[in-house]
Image (spheres, rainbow, N blue to C red):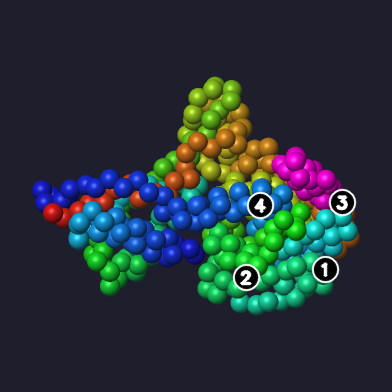
Amino acid sequence: MHELSIAVSIVEMAQEEAESRGHAQVEAVHLRLGLLSGVVKQALLSCYEMACEATPLEGSQLLIEEIPVEVFCPQCAVPRAIRSIQWFCCPECGTSTPTVLRGKELEVVALEIKE
Amino acid sequence: MNAETRLLEVRKNVLKQNDLIARALRQRFREAGVLAVSLVSSPGSGKTAFLEKMLAMLRSRHRVAALVGDLATENDAARLARSHAPVKQIITGTICHLEAAMVQNALEGWDLNQLDFLFIENVGNLVCPSSYDLGEDLRLVLLSVTEGEDKPLKYPTIFNSADVAIITKWDLAAAVEFDEAAVKSNIQAVRPGMEVFTLSAKTDEGIAECIKFLELWRKWSRPAIAI
């Protein structure tokens, strides 16, 4: 269970970013979360609330956009989203491939700021 | 979002700090000619027994050392110290995984130029360590025959993040009717092309092949330095 330390990092990062740009109140944090990031969305959401307690972000929301895993199919020579992370292969032609293009993201993309 | 709120673009990796330290470590390992090999598995898969064997066997020809992560005890370091290789314990407290900064701190005072292989044993956990780059050259995921063939499908993220799979306690394979073909197919499903070794730290079966692989890997990845 490492979601709490990740939630704390998110809160700290959001706070620093907002303050460095002269904004006090963060209403929401937009996060991109890859399905291969090793972080569980539901656990992160509950930890986020805890991590926000007694910080300027208390009461703010964490908005998570889940990013599917995309691999490069060497047969079709195009990126393809896989159907399950238990099977790294092209959903069209079935060729297996270890080349992951997307899906490991754990990234704060934007903050909603109250003016 | 109402009229009073606006969107501020950030685009920052949450684990950026860890990744920066990991990158710096990887660079240091490369420059020093040391191959850093990390071990991940669930608790009780045999990481320490495997490591004891690796240290004992590699030590005759190479300079080896190990860092071992544990939540609370120094038992593993004490076991590994019997190999007479330098070993340092990283006590993580309540943290269920190693982070790059812990590795960096633990290496303080060690001259990496005096090493050929550095092993980093993670805390027994198949979930959390997958998110943290430690700067290692190779990540080994261990799985014992008593755990069942479907472990890779249950923990695809960590298996996908690893470079080599090691199936341990091979001496028990027949007793537990372990299905080698099934586990290998499950490993290939979550990490196509992954190298797999089957071995027993008790009988030494398969150990030599694994040692040879690590030696070759160091030779290939450190061509200017490795002898």
Q: In this rendering, which labeled residue sits more in front, label 2 or label 4?
A: 4
Circle 4 chain: B
Residue B99 in the image: above or below residue B94: above
Q: Is B87 located above or below residue B126 in the figure?
A: below
> Are the residues tagged 2 and 4 within 8 Å (C-beta)?
no
- Is circle 3 on the same chain as circle 1? yes
Q: Which structural element holds mark 2? A: strand
Name the residue rendered at 65%, 67% in the picture.
B109
Q: Residues within 10 Å of mark 4 (few under 14, many from 20)?
A: many
Q: Label 1's element?
A: loop
The span shown in magenta is: B207-227
For disc 3, the marked residue is B208
Amino acid type shown at disc 2: Ile
Tell which residue pokes out farthest to the left in this image: B3
**Residue A21's x, y, as percent?**
23, 53
- Which of disc 4 and disc 2 is earlier in sequence? 4
- Dot 3: chain letter: B
For the point 84% across and 60% down, the residue is B59
Mark 2 and mark 3, same subunit? yes
Mark 3 nearby-residue class (10 Å; few <14, some 14–19, many ≥20): few
